[in-house]
Image (tube, grey):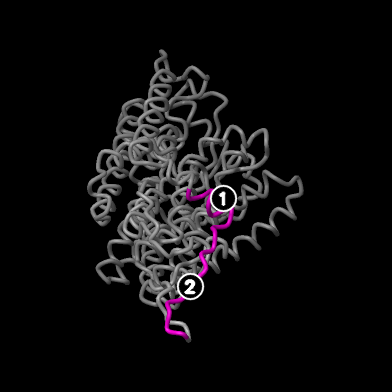
Amino acid sequence: MAIFARIEPASGISWVNLHRRDTSDLPSASGDPVTAPQRRPAAGAAALVRISRLLTARRITLHALLLAVCLWSVYALDLATPGLRDRAGHIKGADFLHFYTAGYLVKSGRLPALYNPPALAAYQQALVPQSTHTYFVASYGPQLYLPFSQLARLPYVWAALVWALLNCALYFGCCYAVWRCCPRLRPYAGAVSLLALAFPGFFNLIAFGQTSGPALLLFTLAFLALRWRRNFLAGLAIGSLIYKPQLGLAAAVVFLLAAEWKIVAGALAAAAAQLSFAWGWFGGTVMKQYFHSLLRTSQALPFIEPKLYQMHCLRGFWLLLLPWRNIAGALYVVTAMAVLAATVLCWRSRASLSLRFAALLVASVLVAPHLMIYDLIILAPAFLFLGDWALERREAATVPGLRVFLYLAYAFPLLEPLAKVSHVQFSVLAFAVLLGWTRLATMEDRNRGYMASPAAF
């Protein structure tokens, strides 16, 4: 989230070459020093340096303040209406309505209606009569709905407020825990707080009332466990993402290919424990209904993905760009494999854990087959890690580009309405380039005597 750093290129270091520190002092045959030819930066690299110099701490803080004021004031104005419909005519709380209804079914023991769309819609309209013409499909395991059975004891508005406050606590708690692990960001506490508040992923998490907050918590716990060298505990956190399995897809592949067997063992144990608990608590009938609903996912896609321009992953990118679903699906597989290959290389490098984990989080977003804007909340630690690394390695050749694309990856989700017209999700492009630049950073972090070349990317 911290995307500012003062750029001070070291003398004798080119921005565009991969070379050891300078040989200008080596003597010639005559004994006189030889001056190495100074190569001019490539146009693209020079442009990145110029743009990155504009991203000062003061300017970034001002941008975050303006964005936070605009987003949250407009949201407050949108909700300032009588009744449960906002100014746009949408139900207040958005997707939370589904979790509230499912929680009521769990609380009242009406479990057969959970994975029966017509019955689910009937109970929803009985609970919240103003939700007519708003429909949902239960696509989560029943274990996720268990905590909402307690919220269902409250009136809908109060339950939505409590859930929003819980998401806020999870989000800012995770941001604080990660920030404490970023020593170079300590002097920028105010700027980091504003950037966290204005982050589009967080804003949409609250606006949609979604369940991505626990996923952020699990990724944060996984990082802390890895930092303490407790790989099995990190695996337990990753495996607990089985409630939202698309977010754990990249981690599963990367840890398998990187032969991180303790992490894999912990992940399998956590996933099996969560599903076993659900089977024991809800019974085999409900779990079979859940698995059958997963098999019918393709039929429910019009309800699950009604607006492709709201997706911020590779699959959504290709489906939005191309009218041919088969070709889009094939391109998703190819590009996802490329992303996973780059992430495995990052993870197996000798770079710092924070840099490698940032690559994993960006890959988790890109590779997920279904990822909406509120799921981008899991990128918050990645932004903090990359910002901290840029401050630590101010003279590194990759820092200007890293800072520029970090800024774009943070801001481009705001262009979601433009994707509806252009059929190009610019945030996905920014995430992909950011991952490539992070790969260069891991190479540079591994070989501190070399200067990795942005032109190489």
Q: Earlier in the sequence, mark 2 or mark 1?
A: 2
Judged from the image, the secondary structure of the residue bearing numbered disc 2 is loop
Question: Looking at numbered disc 2 in the image, what kind of residue is underneath it?
Answer: His
Q: At 53% from the left edge and 33% from the top edge, which residue is drawn? A: 121
Query: Which residue corresponds to mark 2?
Result: 19
Q: Which is closer to the viewer, label 2 or label 1?
A: 2
Residue 395 lies in what quarter of the image?
A: bottom left
Where residue 79 sits in the image (x, y, percent)? Answer: 41, 20
- Residue situated in front as seen by the camera: 296 or 431: 431
Q: Is residue 336 magenta?
A: no
Q: Is residue 39 magenta?
A: yes
Q: Tell me if residue 337 comes above or below residue 348 in the rendering.
A: above
Q: Residues within 10 Å of mark 2 (few under 14, many from 20)?
A: some
Q: Residues within 10 Å of mark 1 (few under 14, many from 20)?
A: many
Where residue 375 sits in the image (x, y, percent)? Answer: 46, 46
Q: Residue 313 bears which disc, if any?
A: 1
Residue 213 lies in what quarter of the image?
A: top left
Label 2–label 1 contact, CB within 8 A: no
Q: Which residues are magenta?
A: 30-49
Residue extending furthest bottom? 29
Q: Tell me if residue 185 comes above or below residue 356 in the rendering.
A: above
Where residue 435 sits in the image (x, y, percent)? Answer: 50, 58
Q: Residue 433 bears which disc, if any?
A: none
Question: Looking at numbered disc 1 in the image, what kind of residue is underneath it?
Answer: Cys
Most common secondary structure along the magenta stretch: loop
Q: Tell me if residue 149 comes above or below residue 15 in the rendering.
A: above
Whether residue 239 is visible here, answered yes or no, is no
Whether residue 19 is visible here, answered yes or no, is yes
Where residue 389 sits in the image (x, y, percent)? Answer: 35, 58
Q: At 48% from the left edge and 72% from the top edge, which residue is drawn? A: 19
